[in-house]
Amino acid sequence: MKPLAKTRSILFRDLGLIDYKEAWDKQEDSLALVIKEKLETGKFAGNGFYPKDQVVYFCEHPHVYTLGKSGQNQNLLIPDAILQKINATFYRIDRGGDITYHGPGQIVGYPIIDLEALNIKVKDYVWSLEETVIRTLASYGIEAGRLEGTTGVWLDTGVPGKTRKICAIGVRVSRYVTMHGFALNVNTDLRYFQYINPCGFTDKGVTSMQQETGREIDIEDVQRRLREKFSEVFQVELHTE
């Protein structure tokens, strides 16, 4: 992986519990601002351009399933009537990846950042998101890693029948500006994953920090550590307004 740019500052905003579509709209607005700034200035990689409108959003969502542009509808295993019964919604969206679940007790991160300004390739960006989560989990004594051929953060990748995902990753990149991101299961109600083939897999499980440690985790503490590790991995400072 290439060395990243020198330390820069990016806005951090905690959106709290927010409707999925509302958060999606915020991402689109922020993405448009960064792209507009790039086009209007005509400044791109290699000349010190650094968009002022970059932002990293953290949030939680009410129960929702999202299906990526390459996903298969059959990986949602329940009809609309059951969705309503379990108080969940469904969106087909424009990120990569297949189907996943978002809900209370899960930290969702949406970085809207310019990869050119940070001198980082898309593949390295995904690696860095995974690394941020892996280091955060390690600080809680949870050993996690990557699974060859797929994205996200996994446990017991070398143990057949026990491999399970703790963090999903799906991104979209437009003019080298990112949106969507990661979803880390902290105190997530894992029963909601029973209604899908998570990320399209039928032979791998899903877990949470609570499940792995046997105790409820302080989600604000996890958020704080994620911010620290994000800053460490991406070599940026996350500041609040």
Image (tube, grey):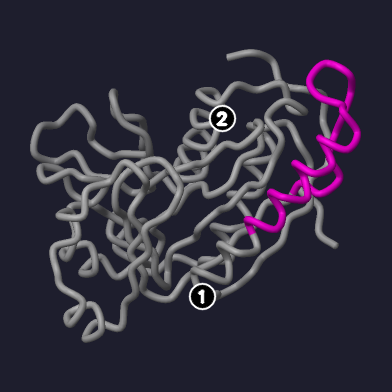
| Pick the front one: 28 or 148 | 28
Image spot of residue 32 (x, y percent): 72, 50
Residue at screen point 38% across, 47% down: 168
Crowding near the residue tagged with mark 2, few <14, some 14–19, many ≥20 C-alpha atoms within 10 Å: some
Label at residue 19: 1
Residue at screen point 77% across, 44% down: 34
In the rendered structure, the answer to whether residue 186 lies left or right of residue 173 reads left
Asked whether residue 39 is drawn in magenta, I would say yes
Quarter holding the N terminus is: top right
Number of numbered labels in the structure image: 2
Q: Secondary structure at mark 2?
A: helix
Q: Report which quarter residue 101 is drawn in.
A: bottom left
Residue at screen point 36% across, 69% down: 64
* Marks 1 and 2, the one that precedes in the sequence: 1
Q: Are marks 1 and 2 in contact (CB under 8 Å)?
A: no
Residues rendered magenta in the picture: 27-54
Label at residue 125: 2
